[in-house]
Image (cartoon, rainbow, N blue to C red):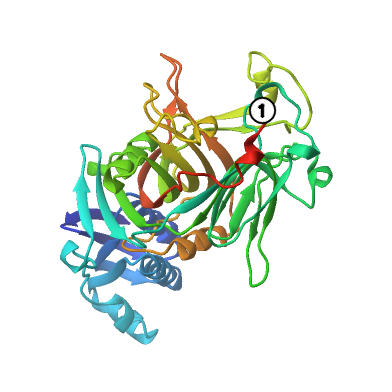
């Protein structure tokens, strides 16, 4: 089998030559999957030179058509050999698969959509709830992670509703004693929560809210933000390039005109750079992050180029005096931009394009039940040996300004 691809505006034409049977079905599927991973969401197939089509080939066509339809893309057959057309007519797929691919043009975007470009990326900004803010609650003492031993007095419950964005160190369980020895990185957004236990299993756990049930996390320290996003920012690297985390959050700050933002992000990632605890911080130890003790406490993920889908939450500020300062870490080499982000990782799947809703997008990914890890994201700027930061191909950011006065500030006392 031979497959060739030609870009025609927003549509990718895929020409196939040979037999589309069980022997070649996987090869064909991999070719289509690679095109989608590279950002092609509108495919037009030319099957004029396909001499045979079996059920295996039909299955590939149907699955790809459904996958693209789910992310507001299209797959159609522009032309086909008489044999292929007759087979698809017999199985009642001719009216479904044959037609003209119509890519969504910027002119059809909802009123109020703003477009912007930088050297690295293109952005599409949609208003969600223009006056919305996130109300912030600081939990626990982040400084104690370095040398201290967390106790039951440091443990607070975070109830993760659909309006909650939260991250920090925590665990699923009834109370501190129930979670002893398992505290690690957690993330919560849109009623979906994930946690990486530090009990040696290295298997992340997750909970999804249902009617009347909301996940609860026992938190040693973290940030809980409640509210609705004010803006949706769609982004994509220019010319197939990647967009780094710091580039993305800096652009969002500029586009929103705010100094401090809460983030929920769904993105197709080219690489992820982060770390996760190996040992629960409720077991006391001094100098946890000094060498060589750090090797027993932290596992680093060095940004290998493996496509993945990342669900991320966090906050970022360009204001050095912001009340969140003790929870923020440098995101760039000059430390002018500070933030704190956690990510739940899943096998790669395309993120739907256009204006999308936060809850539906996040829940769709979590309901795949394929979570692979939970990370605290880093920017490793060490000269020569540094691995840089996480980079993304495209995705969606839901953002909102953070209420400047965090509620329950007493919980942040040492």
Q: Residue furthest right?
A: 177
Q: Which residue is depicted at the point 65% across and 20% down?
A: 294
Q: Can residue 139 be seen from the camera position used here?
A: no
Q: Nearer the viewer, residue 384 or 17?
A: 384
Bin the neighbour count of mark 1 within 10 Å (Cα to Cα): few under 14, some 14-19, many 20 and up.
many
Give coordinates of residue 355: x percent, y percent: 33, 63
Please determine whether, in this image, residue 233 is positioned above or below residue 79.
above
Q: Which residue is mark 1?
A: 145
Instruction: Classify residue 194 as left or right of residue 256.
Output: right
Where disc 1 sits, the SS reads: helix
Q: Nearer the viewer, residue 338 or 280?
A: 338
Please determine whether, in this image, residue 159 is positioned above or below residue 213.
above
Instruction: Classify residue 173 as left or right of residue 12.
Output: right
Q: Quadrant of the C terminus?
A: top right
Instruction: Classify residue 163 as left or right of residue 45.
Output: right
Q: Quadrant of residue 317?
A: top left
Please determine whether, in this image, residue 113 is positioned above or below residue 294.
below
Q: Which residue is depicted at the point 67% across and 71% down?
A: 212
**How many badges with numbers are in the image?**
1
Q: Nearer the viewer, residue 68 or 228?
A: 228
Give coordinates of residue 105: x percent, y percent: 18, 64
Instruction: Classify residue 408 as left or right of residue 356.
Output: right
Q: Which residue is depicted at the point 60% across and 41% down?
A: 409
């Amino acid at each position: 089998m031979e497959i060739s691809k030609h870009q025609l505006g927003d549509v990718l034409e895929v020409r196939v030559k040979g037999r589309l049977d069980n022997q070649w079905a996987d090869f064909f599927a991999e070719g289509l999957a690679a095109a989608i991973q590279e950002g092609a969401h509108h495919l037009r197939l030319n099957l004029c030179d396909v001499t045979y089509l079996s059920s295996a080939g039909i299955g590939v066509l149907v699955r790809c058509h459904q996958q693209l339809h789910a992310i507001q893309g299209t797959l159609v057959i522009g032309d086909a050999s008489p044999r292929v057309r007759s087979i698809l007519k017999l199985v009642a797929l001719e009216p479904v698969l044959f037609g003209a691919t119509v890519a969504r043009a910027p002119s059809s975007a909802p009123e109020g959509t703003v477009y912007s470009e930088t050297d690295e990326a293109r952005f599409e900004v949609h208003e969600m709830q223009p006056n919305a803010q996130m109300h912030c609650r600081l939990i626990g003492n982040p400084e104690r992670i370095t040398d201290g031993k967390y106790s039951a007095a440091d443990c607070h419950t975070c109830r993760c509703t659909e309006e909650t964005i939260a991250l920090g160190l925590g665990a699923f369980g009834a109370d501190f004693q129930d979670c002893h020895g398992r505290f690690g990185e957690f993330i919560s957004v849109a009623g979906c929560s994930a946690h990486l236990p530090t009990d040696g299993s290295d298997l992340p756990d997750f909970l999804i809210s249902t009617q009347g049930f909301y996940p609860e996390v026992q938190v040693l320290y973290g940030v809980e933000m409640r509210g609705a996003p004010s803006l949706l920012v769609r982004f994509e690297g220019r010319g197939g390039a990647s967009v780094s985390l710091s580039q993305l959050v800096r652009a969002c700050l500029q586009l929103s005109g705010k100094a401090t933002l809460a983030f929920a992000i769904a993105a197709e990632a080219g690489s992820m750079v982060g770390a996760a605890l190996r040992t629960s911080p409720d077991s006391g130890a001094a100098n946890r992050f000094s060498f060589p003790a750090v090797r027993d406490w932290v596992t680093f993920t060095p940004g290998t180029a493996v496509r993945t889908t990342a669900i991320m939450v966090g906050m970022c500020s360009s204001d050095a005096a912001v009340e969140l300062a003790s929870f923020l870490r440098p995101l760039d080499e000059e430390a002018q931009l500070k933030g704190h982000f956690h990510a739940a990782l899943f096998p790669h799947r395309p993120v739907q394009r256009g204006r999308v809703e936060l809850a539906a997008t996040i829940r769709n990914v979590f309901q795949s039940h394929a979570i692979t890890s939970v990370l605290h994201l880093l920017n490793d700027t060490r000269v020569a040996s540094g691995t840089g930061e996480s980079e993304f191909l495209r995705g969606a950011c839901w953002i909102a300004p953070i209420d400047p006065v965090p509620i329950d500030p007493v919980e942040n006392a040492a």
